[in-house]
Amino acid sequence: MPGSQFGVLAHPNPQLIKIGSGDLTGPEFSTHLLVAKGQLQSDWVASTIAPAWQVQAVQEVALPADSPAWWGTPKMIEFAAFLPDISLIYQLVSSVRREVCTWCGNELIGDRCGLCSAPLKPPENQTHGSGVLNQGTPMHHGS
């Protein structure tokens, strides 16, 4: 659609909106925002996203060189929200369950591997039964 502009959110929940007819759901905590402008001249991220997400600071950075090829156009603005307080990040990371990914061996934090996206295996049944299924009528041997 020529002239249309869209907002895309990749993580934690993918979202796609047409700018002006919807809102992107932001983080539930205060963040800072990095903004990288391509050839699109718009203040939408700073004027709409930042206040809606209660962003504490907005910093402009250079657009990554591969972005126009990735999105298929140089007319874009990329943005990323982040926690600026390293002690808060440390608290969050140290408070979650850590496992080794069963697929790639990478340490994973949370419920999905950050490297290969494999989900965490559900905990195995911790009860140790006899290994014999007890279904139906009991069998009586000889008399």
Image: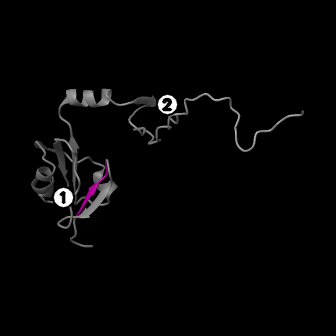
Q: Which image quarter is the N terminus in?
A: bottom left
Which residue is labeled 1 in the image? 39
* Dot placed on the residue nearer the N-terminal end, 2 or 1: 1
Considering every residue shown, the one lying at the far right of the view is 143
Secondary structure beneath label 2? loop
Would you identify the image quadrant in which residue 33 lies?
Answer: top left
The picture places residue 28, in percent across and down from the top left corner, at 21, 45
Which residue is labeled 2 in the image? 105
Side of 52 relative to 105 (left or right): left
Q: Of residues 100 and 130, which is closer to you in this image?
A: 130
The picture places residue 66, in percent across and down from the top left corner, at 31, 49
Whether residue 34 is situated above or below residue 73 in the rendered picture: above
Considering every residue shown, the one lying at the far bottom of the view is 1
Residue type of the residue flagged with mark 2: Gly
- Neighbor class of circle 2 (other Cα within 10 Å; few <14, some 14-19, many 20+) is few
Q: Is residue 53 magenta?
A: no
Total marks shown come to 2
Q: Which residues are magenta?
A: 6-11
Q: Which image quarter is the C terminus in?
A: top right
Marks 2, 1: nearer the viewer: 2
